Amino acid sequence: MTMNHPNFGAMEPSRVIIFDTTLRDGEQSPGFSMNIDEKVRMAEALAALGVDVLEAGFPAASPGDFEAVNRIARETRGMVITGLARSSVNDITRAGEAIQPAERKRIHTFISTSPLHMKYKLRMEPQTVLEAVTSSVTLARKFTDDVEWSAEDGTRTDIEFLFRCVEAAIKAGATTINIPDTVGYAVPEDMVRIFSQVRENVPGADKIILSAHCHNDLGLGVANTLAAVRAGARQIECTINGIGERAGNAALEEIVMAIRTRPDANPFTHNIETTRILRTSKLLASITGFDVQPNKAIVGRNAFAHESGIHQDGMLKNAATYEIMTPESVGWQKTSLVMGKHSGRAAFRDKLNALGYGDVGDNALNDAFRRFKDLADRKKIVYDEDIVALVDDEVVRDHQVIKFVGLEVWAGSKAKPRAVLELEVDGVPHTADCQGDGPVDAAFNAIHAIFPHGAALLLFSVGAVTEGTDAQARCTVRLQEDGKMVDGQGADTDTIVAAVRAYVHALNKLITKRARTAPEALSA
Ligand code: KIV
Ligand code: ZN
């Protein structure tokens, strides 16, 4: 192979580039939207994880998306930062501007190539699509030497037409060619056939990197991705926890661990620091409010739990009997029991470092430490998961307009539930005393009394951070206003306090969104 990629040079033949699209394709799934600070935090975690290319967003989609890509391009180092663009001049120009400050940058432009998409979605003739491939890649190259071109719905594209499109993109200067399984329709044999045929039939295919981007509609996202790599793809597009449109994208953690655990079947290398997988997965879950299911491979709560007597017996004799990889290799800790009420600030900071929170600012650290002490007073055992929930809670709350101060509730089967809530709005203390159909309703009414707003409550859910009746509750609140949807999270041993924290977090996100579209609209 005589490839000399602008950002990766002459690559080792076995090296696979990990392209993470958690902040773009992942964020497109309903309810998974993140604000800019959360995206920057996630980007930093992905850089520490060892991701090679980060798709930071879709700059032409909204001013907020543009700003997120632009801030990540300015503030993160190491990764190639890319923004997605349709084949229009506006999209490509916005993407080019957004990634401009990055030390290593790429534009990712795409157009649909399948008969179905061209006829019904684009209403374009194949010849016009072909011309758009050339003009879009040519324009993107004016902003950066590293241009990725994608054939949307590539796996349902007529193979001869796919060859022509890929050839046009390479001739116009694309350095990565992505053939996505956009609707998760392919089976592994299709991926092998398509990638092998493109390599064999398209002139110049040996000088670019082929990329796989698989959706999971049939649960085959990871299998299809690995099949593409076996057939010559050297870039994998994936997301943390497999989040993404509909059934999601191929999960980064599953692909990486399949390569690491089965080098005989997958003789490839990557740069991922696998021991950081779990904390990255948990960070995403705490930002979006969606935990992975307990049996999720690699990062689910049960992924390394052994319940049956036969399995436990085998494990005690030799862990390899039922464990194909060690929990530690993906970041699970042997002992998750930590710290108590006598632990001091220095120990708390050490613990945060060990948990990957070395970069927490002083304000968030002080508030988190205060809450840790309070938690240690109320809860018999403080686990690592408790600390993670608490710190994430504080970090998302740093610099927010509305702050939770305190709550008292009266509930039960006899009296009408009542809540007395204290909030600070722009630094000014407010109190409200309200009743409701249950303590959560009373507390939410009190939020309305202090901060009147028109947002509709779409979802309220409660989960537990750890086990036991003294576990912290983690609540999610989804609000919608003027077509904008946001999720807020809150954690506390008191479920009603966690619910109020989640509601306040969601309101703060709405305020940020409002301020971005109308800077004067900062109060209710
Ligand atoms: O699934 C898909 O086809 C995409 C493209 C924009 C790459 O996400
Ligand atoms: Zn996709």
Image (cartoon, rainbow, N blue to C red):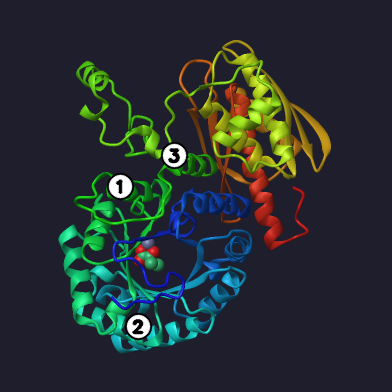
Whether label 1 touches label 3, CB < 8 Å: no
The relative height of residue 142 versus residue 188 in the rendered view (above or below) is below
Give residue 260's mark.
Answer: 1
Residue at horizontal 66 percent and vertical 15 percent from the top: 342
Count neighbours of disc 2 (C-alpha within 10 A) and say few if under 14, some if 14 to 19, many if 20 or more. many
Dot 1 or dot 3: first in sequence order is: 1
Give residue 278's mark.
Answer: 3
Report the image quarter containing ligand 1.
bottom left
In this orientation, which residue lies closer to the viewer: 318 or 497?
A: 318
Residue 99 appears in view: yes
Label 2 element class: helix
Dot 2 or dot 1: first in sequence order is: 2
Count neighbours of disc 1 (C-alpha within 10 A) and say few if under 14, some if 14 to 19, many if 20 or more. some
**At label 2, which amino acid type do we have?**
Ile
Label 1 element class: helix
Horizontal relation, residue 222 to residue 358: left or right: left
Label 3 element class: helix
Residue at which label 2 appears? 170
